[in-house]
Image (cartoon, rainbow, N blue to C red):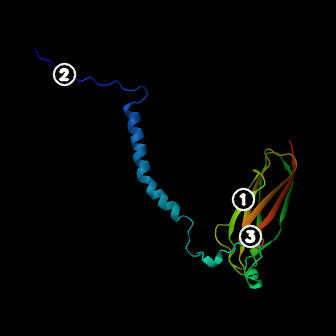
Amino acid sequence: MSYKLHYVKPPRPSGTSPLKRRGILLFCLSAFLLFPFSFLLFLSCGNSGNKELSVSDIINPLTADGLDEKQKASLPEFQFDVLTYDFGKVIQGERLSYVFHFKNVGKSSLLISSIEPSCGCTTSIPPQAPIRPGEKGEISITFDSTHKKDDVTSYLVITANTFPAQTLLTVTAKVITP
């Protein structure tokens, strides 16, 4: 008695065609090959190399207690053109922008570590590079009046290596429903 063995192909799972499996394989392979290059590109973006930070640039006291007069005098200092901006009357749904201009009138480089808005209606773009003594900088803000009505006040808390460590900017508007 002789037996013949026959190979039976296992059934293909439904929904996975050879073309779909090939597409997934190509996607994974391209992601694997492109990730290292995109990571290197990300690390090199925005680094002009001419504004390097040193340890002496980073002074961020919580309080001035314990600092002598010389240390207090050496801190960076904001000097804003205005601390409050009023958009006036706006129609609900408008997105408005404004730029707060400032100058570092202190004795060392000014570093903004964060800008926290009081609500989601206001976003900001701080400078990424240090602002050297005597240099000017700007903080761009955008106010979205979509879900607002009547009198609106939004605050932006800037945390930097200044004393005091936080500075408050204010944006106001009178939102009119259409």
Q: Which quadrant is the N terminus positioned in?
A: top left
Q: Position of residue 77 (x, y in %)?
A: 76, 75
Residue linked to disc 3:
62
Q: Is residue 13 left or right of residue 95?
A: left
Which label's residue is closer to the chain start, 3 or 1? 3
Q: What amino acid does circle 1 point to?
A: Ser
Q: Judging from the image, what secondary structure is the residue with disc 1 in?
A: strand
Q: Position of residue 146 (x, y in %)?
A: 78, 45
Q: Is residue 89 left or right of residue 24?
A: right
Tell me if label 3 and label 2 are in contact, CB under 8 Å: no
Q: Judging from the image, what secondary structure is the residue with disc 2 in?
A: loop
Q: How far is disc 3 from disc 2 in space, using C-alphas?
A: 81 Å
Q: Which mark is residue 5?
A: 2
Q: How far is disc 2 from disc 1 in space, using C-alphas?
A: 72 Å
Question: Residue extending furthest top?
Answer: 1
The image quadrant that residue 84 belongs to is bottom right
Which label's residue is closer to the chain start, 2 or 1? 2
The image quadrant that residue 26 belongs to is top left
Residue 75 lies, with reference to residue 144, above or below; the image says below
Q: Position of residue 51 (x, y in %)?
A: 60, 75
In the foreground, 62 or 114: 62
Question: Residue extending furthest bottom?
Answer: 70
Q: What amino acid does circle 3 point to?
A: Leu
Query: Is residue 46 shown to the viewer in this render?
Result: yes
Q: Residue, x 69% and y 79% (percent of image)?
A: 108
Tell me if label 2 and label 1 are in contact, CB under 8 Å: no
- Density class for disc 2 (Cα within 10 Å; few <14, some 14-19, many ≥20) is few
Q: How far is disc 3 from disc 1 in space, using C-alphas?
A: 24 Å
Q: Residue, x 78% and y 71% (percent of image)?
A: 164
Which label's residue is closer to the chain start, 3 or 2? 2
Residue linked to disc 1:
124
Q: Is residue 63 left or right of residue 52?
A: right
